[in-house]
Image: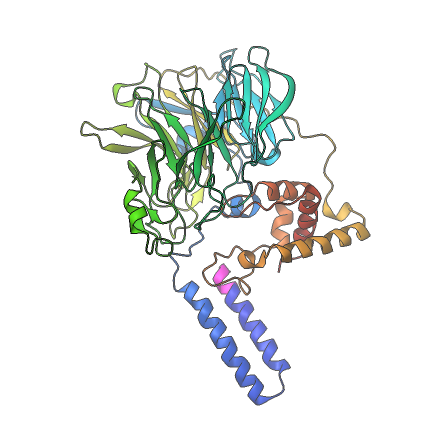
Amino acid sequence: MPFRAMARARAASIGRDMLERVPSRAARFLLVMLLFLAVAVGACRWLLPERFAVNAPIRQLLFGSGRDAPAAEAVGGLLSVPDGFVIELWADGIPNARLLRFTPAGDLLVSTPRTGRILLVERDRDGDGWPDGRRVLLEELDRPHGLDLHDGWLYVGETGAIARVRFDAQRRSIDGPLERVVTDLPAGGNHWTRTLRFGPDGWLYVSIGSSCNVCLETDPRRAALVRYRPDGSDEQVVATGLRNAVGFDWHPATGDLYATDNGRDLLGDDFPPCELNRIVPGGFYGWPIAHGDRVPDPEFGKGRQAEIERSLPPVHAFRAHNAPLGIQFLRGGHWPPDYRHAAIVALHGSWNRTRKDGYEVVSLHRGAAGAIEERRFVTGFLREDEEVIGRPVDVAEGPDGAVYVSDDYAGAIYRIALAGNTQRSRPGRSEAPAPAAGGRAPLAERPAAAREAARRRGAALYRTHECTRCHDPEQADPGVVVVPLGAAQLREKYDVEELSAYLLAPTPPMPAFPLAESERRDLAVFLLAAPAG
């Protein structure tokens, strides 16, 4: 049964039950009027399906991950690339694969925030078209996301800190202890990922997304791009008004810095656009008071025309809710002329549209007149406008002259190369890394008394953090996008430890709450033990 029909049926059942318990005719009349008003308020949400649409890959929204990657031999029939290119599955079994960075030795580093790990995927030395192995390089990190290499150090962007450790690329080894050179980044909220890259000027640039969909931030580093010296000193805010600039890169010819940015939600299918912005020092890019080409926000833009006029519009507008994330300018001299210095951008895909959009990789090309042309580069992750088989996240140009794309929905990495630049000699999948030691016990195997105590603590956390506002259709505020939870559904995907890990790094738009590990475990027990509400 569709969710809205289920909600209406549930509300009708509750209403009948309430009426049967009320003895007075006058009281019944008053209750009927109150129920009518409640239904009328709720109807406002149903009458605005476009603005408040929730149309995401439901498995990732509820469970944090999607499906297995397609079989290697099926990729060419499912995913499409332009004429003259080929696409292959290069690695799979990497849950929550996010940002990518190649080492000087040709290996690929992959961040997996939900596992707290950085993986090293070994280069293909034997020429069979598959990585030669993989290993856990770092673990027990706090939602690691961005990563880069500089002067013998591996830098990692955690949600509230910037860490670094000595790294020998040739030996594939970490040397010495991990140190956190910045420890006070604003953490949590809707946008908890931290992307970092070293610029041509030798400074470390870090993007910090907003804490919300749309609001006035109190920390000037939120919805901004900041930079540091390599030792973490001399913090400087470079640009503001960037709601969630997950990806950024420098143009190889001009040196200009460009950043993708995700537009706000809940203003309809086609507004506001997501953005590509050319970043200039001190630039203000509009959020939360303006979107796109200086269009005022209906709430926060009132009376702020002067600020809106000084905001910088995007140099390219992606379609609304496409969620552009990773960006990479092509630097290799082997690319066809119209692809040299083109930008490859991963579109993670929409959730707040009545019809899904995005879920692809695009290329951006500068035309003769200076306008940017957007072309499709990898398609097929969204099939028949509904079924999602992948969500692209990051893009990296490899030393072998190919483009690599991560997919956090299927836990995969794809390789796109010019036709002829492939050496695949065997079918099959690459091997996944070994799971963490210790094993995981299902909820039923926990002692009954301990399970009940944890459930009660989790229920209290559920109330304290007002989770019903987003997960219970009867208690949600008008206009809130409701995502119902069900213990039976959750138990199909998670045990306690797995759900606890998901709560550490939830899929947006769910915010990351500042919960201790024990609190996440208690909340997981509550969610798995009984229907939320």
Could you tell me which residue is drawn at 28 percent across and 19 percent down? 336
Q: Position of residue 196 (x, y in %)?
A: 48, 28
Magenta range is 2-6
**Residue 266 vs residue 452: left or right?**
left
Instruction: Please name whichever residue, 161 or 387, is drawn nearer the observer in this view of the structure.
Output: 161
Q: Position of residue 159 (x, y in %)?
A: 56, 36
Residue 219 vertical position relative to residue 267 in the rendered view, above or below: above
Instruction: Please name whichever residue, 34 or 488, is drawn nearer the observer in this view of the structure.
Output: 34
Instruction: Please name whichever residue, 341 or 285, is drawn nearer the observer in this view of the structure.
Output: 285
Using the rendered view, name the quadrant where residue 95 is placed.
top right
Q: Quadrant of the C terminus?
A: bottom right
- Residue that extends furthest to the bottom in the rendered view of this protein: 25
The answer to if 236 sits in the magenta stretch is no
**Residue 336 vs residue 264: left or right?**
left
Could you tell me which residue is drawn at 32 percent across and 14 percent down? 333
Residue 483 vertical position relative to residue 122 in the rendered view, above or below: below
Q: Position of residue 123 (x, y in %)?
A: 52, 15
Examine the rendering and report whether any part of residue 70 can be seen.
no
- Residue that extends furthest to the front in the rendered view of this protein: 234
**Residue 334 vs residue 532: left or right?**
left
**Residue 460 vs residue 466: left or right?**
right
Instruction: Please name whichever residue, 205 or 247, is drawn nearer the observer in this view of the structure.
Output: 205
Residue 488 vertical position relative to residue 125 in the rendered view, above or below: below
Q: Position of residue 186 (x, y in %)?
A: 54, 40
Could you tell me which residue is drawn at 55 percent across and 40 percent down? 187
For the stretch drawn in magenta, the main secondary structure is helix
Examine the rendering and report whether any part of residue 463 can be seen.
yes
Using the rendered view, name the quadrant where residue 134 is placed.
top right
Report the number of discs. Answer: 0
